[in-house]
Image: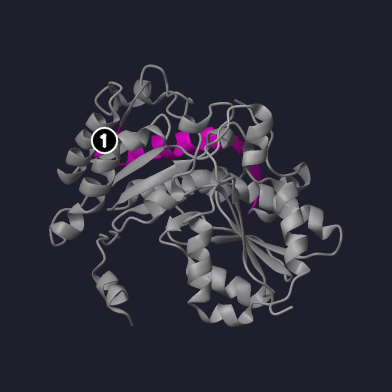
Amino acid sequence: MTFLSSLHRIAPIAATAKRAVKPAFSSAYAVSQQRFNSSSSVEMTVRDALNQALEEELARDEKVFLLGEEVAQYNGAYKVTKGLLDKFGPKRVIDTPITELGFAGLAVGAAMSGLKPICEFMTFNFAMQAIDQIVNSAAKTHYMSGGVVTVPMVFRGPNGAAAGVAAQHSQCYAAWYGSVPGLKVLSPWNSEDAKGLLKAAIRDPNPVVFLENELEYGVSYPMSAEALSSDYVLPIGKAKVEREGKDITIVSHSRSVGFSMKAAEELAKSGISVEVVNLRSIRPLDVDTIVASVKKTNRLITVEGGWASYGVGSEIAAQVMESDAFDYLDAPMVRVAGADVPTPYAKNLEEFAFPDDKVIVKTVRNVLDKKIGA
């Protein structure tokens, strides 16, 4: 065990108390998911799933409150907070001035004082204005106080690729916040992810960065009867195998999971069996599930909308190299990621900047054609 890994054993983590967009998957997949889900299921947008989670947790715990720009009277920039002001009042659903540093600091102080704020950023690009509060105040206080002070709060909002909003409104922060000790970082894909993970984040005693995706808000996914329950909470730090396979593993998060599922469907037509792992949690990262899958398929690619350099895929590559799964690889691991440029504004360039199912299919075929040492 290295010094750094032993130091991590005193990690600054508090113990847990007992527009409409065409989806990045086919209708056939939605039907298969409906069959897979327990009992009957209904279609629900990611937006409505998030709204349901917020409503249930505000009703469950009077210490929970929501603040951010336009979250109250305007029902949120993306209508995620629709109706919550009417149900819970202006002391629990609070409109703030356009000052991310200010209201994030207010939220951190409230969390240190025993409340449970949910701090909404209109986009995580604007959260850069508040990064001092997120990293230096929220993430580090539990450790710096010797475990005396907890900061139970959620920073949430849209992250990653958006449509037609260019470089300053369209990029992924998963790797940024995923590198910070003291934070938990979640990245949901579908409606069940959104609801179950947001409820878990609100109940967690640590600061949680919750990375939604603007292009997924209006997409409908099946919700099982279990997921519709107010008791539905997903575990933080646990990935989900969305599709089992034997020839290659694809690990992805957020919207990239949908593209990975669509690519897996296409590859299946030519007899290629793809296993798709939905990370759900960026930090903590479920290395065990990734390693088990790589040992099974012997090949790995990662897919993300963020940049490849120092990205989530890079961390996964390092974790696999440092594990016994490395000896199981029959071909070099490959990262599929966004182009190494600021997000373009021009539509044709924007389409080239982020990976889709066609890029994934091509990459899988290339990996299957390669062998280590060949």
- Percent x, y of residue 9: 27, 72
Query: For the residue labelled by badge 1, is the local secondary structure a helix, a strand or a loop?
Result: helix
Image quadrant of residue 363?
Answer: bottom right
Q: Is residue 61 magenta?
A: yes
- Percent x, y of residue 318: 49, 69
User: Which residue is most to the right?
Assistant: 270
Provide the residue designation for mark 1.
Answer: 104
The relative height of residue 156 versus residue 304 in the rendered view (above or below) is above
Task: Count the numbered circles shown.
Answer: 1
Please name whichever residue, 101 or 168, is drawn nearer the observer in this view of the structure.
168
Residue type for callout 1: Ala
Residue 286 lies left or right of residue 221; in this view the side is left
Image quadrant of residue 255?
Answer: top right
Residue at point 44%, 52% (across, down):
175
Image quadrant of residue 44?
Answer: top right
Please name whichever residue, 117 or 31, is drawn nearer the observer in this view of the structure.
117
Residue at point 29%, 41% (across, down):
131
Please name whichever residue, 57 or 143, is drawn nearer the observer in this view of the structure.
143
